[in-house]
Amino acid sequence: MKQNGAWPPATKPFLTNPPEGTAGIVLPIRDNLKFFKLAFHSILDFTDYRYMLTLVDNMSGFSTRQYLESIRRNHPVNVLQYQQTHAQGAEWNLGLRFMFAFANVQYGVVLSPDIVVEPYWLSRLTNTLAKTEDIVSPTSNDPLAGLGAPLPFCTAFKRLAYERLNGFDERFHGSLAVMLDFGERARKAGFRPVFDAQIYVHHFKQLRWRSDPDLEIEDENLLNAQPST
């Protein structure tokens, strides 16, 4: 997406002292480096709004840990470790709470490592968030966009909404279950899940996290046990 022959603008993430109105982005990882690199570099190349970026590693193998150490040395990016059984909500919470410790981080964005963002994606997200209290997701190629719940691979919100909802439920393991729960709690609290037609994020949906079938059953049972009102 060139304009006047030039590539779209990009800005470097802040490691400390972020300015007011910064967005905190969480990108988890557990191996699968080829697709993680697509997500990571698309964020670096196409993010045109002030942001912090925190990577959350969930017990990756040696080669991935080496790569993350290289990222930490060469980019202003935070790398945190989540050394427990995969729980998407807990991993997102870890990164968000770390960045929300900076008072100027006013937006949160949670991603999965199997996406590619396009130019202007974050400025458009934050522009929409600045005008609403809603929970905002982009449009996407993934059929999950038709469910009406926040997308489990890219969702953004104001810090106030996240804090009022007390973050993500850490009892869930899979990202879809986490977002179905988060979206329902948001709706009950008066925050609508909405989709912004100005933003598109590509999701490699065939690579969605393959969790233990027993954990998927736990997630489903927990969702079904939630009160309907």
Image: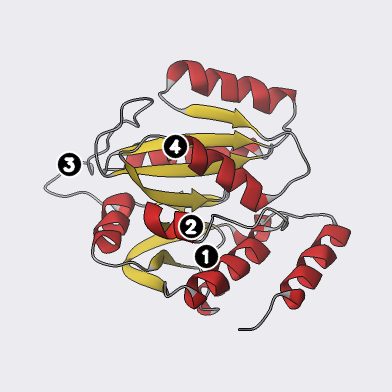
Q: Residue at 72%, 32% (x, y): give it.
A: 60
How far is the residue under mark 3 from the one under mark 4?
Answer: 32 Å
Q: Check disc 4: other Cα within 10 Å, few if <14, some if 14-19, many if 20+.
A: many
How far is the residue under mark 2 from the one under mark 3?
Answer: 27 Å
- Horizontally, residue 102 falls left or right of residue 7, namely right
Residues tagged 2 and 1 counted as in contact (Cβ below 8 A): yes
Query: Residue 6 bears which disc, if any?
Result: 3
User: Looking at this view, is 142 or 30 the one in front?
Assistant: 30
Residue under circle 4?
99
Specify the amino acid type for callout 3: Ala
Q: Which image quadrant for residue 6?
A: top left
Q: Check disc 1: other Cα within 10 Å, few if <14, some if 14-19, many if 20+.
A: many
View extreme (left): residue: 4
Residue under circle 1?
151
Nearer the camera: disc 3 or disc 4: 4
Q: Residue at 68%, 35% (x, y): give it.
A: 82
Residue under circle 2?
154
Residues tagged 1 and 3 counted as in contact (Cβ below 8 A): no
Relative to 73, is 162 above or below? below
Of helix, strand and loop, which one carries label 3? Answer: loop
Nearer the camera: disc 4 or disc 1: 4
Query: Residue 167 bears which disc, if any?
Result: none
How far is the residue under mark 2 from the one under mark 4?
Answer: 17 Å
